[in-house]
Each structure stands twice: as C-alpha cells, then as structure tokens.
Image (cartoon, rainbow, N blue to C red):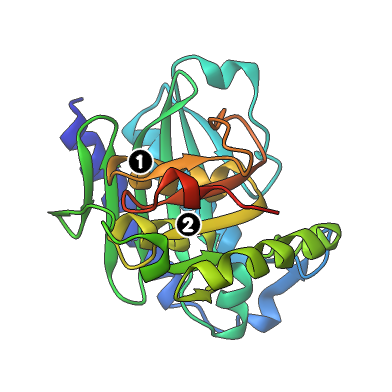
C-alpha cells in the first residue's frame, strides 16, 4: 500500500471517530476517573479507541498498537521494529466532558519507532491535519508552514500536566519566563491541537512538562513537517518511546528565544 492510500485510510478512520464524538450523549454520566488528579475517561474514549484499533488493524494488519485506554499504553521493544499505530482516541477528554472545545482524535503511524504518518482531526471545526515523513504537512489538504514571526510577535501555548501536580510550580515559572517575551499565553487543554496550532502558524511556541507518546506523536510529526523545531525542554531530541517534556517552536522563533531561561 502506498503512502497516499495509507494516509487516506487513516484520515477516513479519524473522521468516523470524530462522528462518534459529535454524536455522544450524556457524557458526564458516562465518565469515570482514572489514577491522578482530574484524570477522566469516558465510554466514548474507549469506543473510539476500539473502533480505531479495529479499522486501522484491517487497513494495516501487520501493525502493532499503542493506545491510551484499556492497557495498551506501553511502548515496547517490539514497537521499535515494523509498524505501530499510536492513538489518542480523544485528546482533551476533560474538554469533552465539560463541553469546552476542542477535543481531537490523534493517530500516528510509527515506522521502526519513529513517526511516519500522522493525522489529527478536530471534528468540531472539521479540521484535518496530516503529515507524511519527509513529504510535508497539510490542513484540509492544503500545505501548511509554521510562522516566520519572532517570539516577541507570537502567542505561546502551554499545557499544565494536570495529572502531575508536582510539576505545577515549574510549569508556571516557565509561563512567567515566556510571558514578557511573547504577545500572550494561551491554553486549550489538548496538547495535540496546541502543537498543530504551532504547525499552522497561529502560535509561535508550545511547551508542556510531561506528555505521553500518544499526546505528541502525531502532532509532533505534523509540526516538524511544517518546519517547526521540536525537542524536550532541555533542547534534546525526542526519543519517541514514552513520556517526555515537549517544547515546539515555529521556524521564526530564534534559537536564543527557544529554550526557557529559568
């Protein structure tokens, strides 16, 4: 199967996952708490993941799966070989539960442990972000590039790693560091969408103290293919094999402004 056909199949699956989200009813009544502060899962997270596992498994039977729900959440040594889908069925579950927008479906196809294809779909605005390694990134089929603006003329988005309150003080120290160096700060509650905003050129920089692989694998590839720089908060290359801090900047943000100063 060629890249275009495979990517189109992943897009179709993500769009159907979005329909499940849009048709959801009684979301609060179908919500459970997981370990950690404000860490929720709904029956719809599980339903979307099950649908994606089934559909993408039929599309590429040899692929393994890494997903946030139902115990499929560990990157293993086997995932460094061949293909593996890395899925966040609903990134922004708290948004989904409370009615705050957006929430997105995120699917990355890893090849030999590195992102190869990526899809992030926002069903509330019908926005489809895609990328193929070495071939570029697209929004609803049109090529995208990150912004050329410097940090001082850009917005900064951030995540709070809410499940890990011990990281809060450091997170807000970083906010205080970046705030005087940019236009202003923004937070949406979905890291995949924030990273896509850097890729689309609406935001200059994004950071979060800790994300899971399924939070950043797809959107990270989209950002890189749109010309962004993406590392951990120390400036080290991402290893794409588990939890990590993430720092992503558009092509206009200088190396001097990229890393935090605190």
Measure the C-alpha gap from mark 2 to mark 1.
13 Å
**Element type at mark 1:** helix
Q: Classify 10 Å Cα crowding around label 2: few (below 14), some (14-19), many (20 and above).
A: many
The disc placed on residue 224 is: 1
Which quarter of the rendered picture does the N terminus lie within?
A: top left
In the rendered structure, which disc, 2 or 1, sits on the residue that comes first in sequence?
2
Classify 257 as above or below 112.
below
- From the viewer's perspective, is 230 left or right of 232? left
**Residue 253 in view (yes/no):** yes
- Looking at this view, is 184 or 57 the one in front? 184
- Looking at this view, is 101 or 154 the one in front? 154
Classify 9 as above or below 104.
above
Give the label, 2 or 1, closer to the camera.
1
From the image, tell me which residue sits under label 2. Answer: 192
Residue 30 screen position, x and y as percent? 67, 75
**Element type at mark 2:** helix
Quadrant of res 167: bottom right
Q: Classify 10 Å Cα crowding around label 1: few (below 14), some (14-19), many (20 and above).
A: many
Give the farthest residue toward the left.
142
């Amino acid at each position: 199967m060629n890249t275009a056909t495979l990517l189109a199949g992943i897009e179709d699956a993500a769009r159907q996952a979005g329909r499940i989200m849009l048709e959801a009813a009684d979301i609060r009544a179908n919500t459970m708490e997981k370990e950690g502060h404000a860490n929720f899962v709904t029956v719809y997270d599980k339903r979307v993941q099950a649908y994606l596992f089934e559909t993408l498994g039929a599309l590429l039977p040899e692929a393994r799966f890494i997903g946030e729900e139902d115990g499929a959440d560990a990157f293993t040594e086997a995932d460094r070989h061949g293909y593996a889908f890395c899925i966040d069925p609903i990134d922004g579950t708290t948004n989904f539960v409370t009615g705050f927008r957006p929430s997105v479906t995120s699917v990355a196809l890893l090849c030999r442990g590195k992102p190869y294809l990526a899809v992030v779909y926002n069903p509330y605005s019908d926005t489809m972000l895609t990328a193929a390694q070495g071939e570029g990134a697209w929004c609803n089929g049109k090529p995208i590039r990150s912004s050329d603006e410097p940090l001082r003329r850009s917005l900064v988005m951030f995540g709070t790693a809410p499940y890990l309150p011990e990281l809060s003080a450091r997170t807000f120290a970083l906010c205080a560091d970046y705030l005087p160096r940019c236009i202003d700060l923004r937070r949406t509650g979905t890291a995949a969408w924030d990273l896509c905003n850097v890729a689309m050129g609406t935001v200059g920089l994004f950071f979060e103290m800790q994300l899971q692989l399924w939070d950043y694998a797809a959107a990270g590839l989209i950002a890189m293919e749109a010309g962004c720089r993406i590392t951990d908060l120390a400036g080290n290359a991402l290893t794409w094999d588990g939890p990590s801090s993430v720092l992503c900047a558009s092509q206009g943000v200088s190396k001097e402004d990229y890393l935090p100063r605190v």
